[in-house]
Amino acid sequence: MDYIDQARYARHSSWESFAAALAAEGRRLVLLTTGAEMRHDRFPFQAGDTIMVGRESSGVPREVAERAHARIRIPMRAGARSLNVALAASVATAEALRQLDGFPGEGDEQA
Ligand SMILES: C[S@@+](CC[C@H](N)C(=O)[O-])C[C@H]1O[C@@H](n2cnc3c(N)ncnc32)[C@H](O)[C@@H]1O
């Protein structure tokens, strides 16, 4: 991607390393899963929340799901299995940005 330099990202060598980094920064892990009871648009996002999505094939392992601070689902029509992972991440991220007034304003300079 020719716009990757606009993103901040980190790679972790393991789940434990990732979980430790979140804990050290006091950030919540919010898991997107079709099995959640809480709707994504009724969940109160906080600044610093980390939204996690699962694998296209099998979601996330149970031990990971159990350690999430919250589990949320995007409502779908009856009979639909799930959304594509990138689409699900986009829908939830857009809702979090909307709640937190986090979309860039027109004319904002790049940080
Ligand atoms: C294609 S789905 C995975 C399907 C997998 N068979 C499962 O049961 O989790 C890929 C990821 O997208 C996210 N996802 C897809 N649809 C979703 C929905 N309606 N609500 C919440 N998360 C969803 C979840 O994080 C899921 O792990």
Image (tube, rainbow, N blue to C red):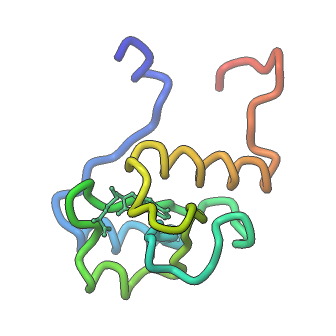
* Count of number-bearing discs: 0
Ligand 1 occupies quarter: bottom left
Query: Measuring 49% from the left and 51% from the top, which residue is drawn there?
Result: 88
Quarter that holds the N terminus: top left
- Left or right, 23 with respect to 74, comes to left
Q: Residue at x 23, y 69 (%)?
A: 15
Image coordinates of residue 66 in percent, x first then y, are 37, 87
- Residue located 44% across and 79% down the image: 35
Give the quadrant of residue 19. Answer: bottom left
Image quadrant in which you'd find residue 40 = bottom right
| Residue 67 drawn above or below residue 74 | below
Q: Indicate left or right for 15 with 51 as reference.
A: left
The spot of residue 4 in percent (x, y) is 40, 23
Position of residue 111 measured from the top left corner of the image (x, y, whole percent): 65, 26
Q: Is 55 displayed left or right of 91 in the figure? A: left
Does 102 sit above or below residue 34? Answer: above
The correct choice, above or below, for 95 with respect to 59 in the image is above
Task: In the rendered view, tell whether residue 94 sits above or below residue 76.
Answer: above
Where on the picture, by quarter, is residue 68? bottom left
Furthest residue in direction front, as rendered = 79
Q: Residue at x 38, y 85 (%)?
A: 67
Residue that sits furthest to the left in the current view: 13
Q: Residue 46 location, x and y as percent?
A: 70, 66
Between 1 and 77, the residue placed more toward the observer is 77
Give the side of residue 1 with respect to residue 87, left or right: left
